[in-house]
Amino acid sequence: MPPSLDTLRAEIQSCRLCAARFAATATAHQPRPVAWFRPGARILVAGQAPGARVHASGKPFDDPSGDRLRDWMGIDRDTFYDQTRLAIIPMAFCFPGYDAKGADLPPPRICSETWHAPLMDALDGIRLTLLVGGYAHRWHLGPSARSVTPTVAAWRDHLPSVFPLPHPSWRNTGWLKKNPWFEAELLPVLRARVAEVLE
């Protein structure tokens, strides 16, 4: 019998697979897995990895990126953080740390290789999946995922159950300005779909 979501959450929260890897980063931090899901969730937000602020708070997207993502979805914080309605499962559950130049390190592959298949099997009520950023695109879409812009531009190919999105980081503000179709065409459909699923 496959493990339940509650069992998986407990196992992820106690995971220390990357302790040595994180200790060797410029931040030299300890693992702090942020597992944000419960039975009953209808929307899956598949992200990249917690940042430093989320590592400190233990709450996913508890930063300006989260504010932008919630705006894209058309929902408030209370709805976003209701685990009975929305699951947040990044490609790595811990903050990967910074390199010597202060840039974010990529999500360690061992995390998704260890946890994602059983999690996807256990999340049986998901009706809408938001793929936030290139790492999530590649894991969930497989060979059909290309670089971020063409993958997001092909968003209609995945309706009504999946929306590939860019990462809502401030670093992508320039991308949003170069691709006005994202806000003009994709976001109204996304917000309507989110509202429909949450009804």
Image (tube, rainbow, N blue to C red):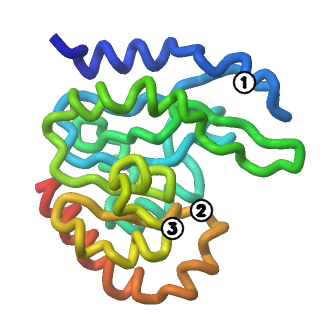
Element type where label 3 sits in the image? loop
Residue assigned mark 2? 169
The mark found on residue 189 in the picture is: none
Looking at the image, is 11 positioned above or below residue 149? above
| Alpha carbon distance from label 2 to label 3 | 17 Å
Q: Are marks 2 and 3 in contact (CB under 8 Å)?
A: no
Q: Are marks 2 and 1 in contact (CB under 8 Å)?
A: no
- For label 2, count other residues whose C-alpha is less than 10 Å away and answer few (under 14), some (14-19) or many (20+): some
- For label 1, count other residues whose C-alpha is less than 10 Å away and answer few (under 14), some (14-19) or many (20+): some
Element type where label 1 sits in the image? helix
Residue assigned mark 1? 21
Whichever of labels 1 and 3 marks the residue nearer the N terminus, that label is 1
Looking at the image, is 76 positioned above or below residue 181? above
The residue at the point 45 percent across, 66 percent down is: 146
**Extreme residue in the front direction:** 143
* Callout 2 amino acid: Ser
The residue at the point 32 percent across, 40 percent down is: 87
Residue assigned mark 3? 147
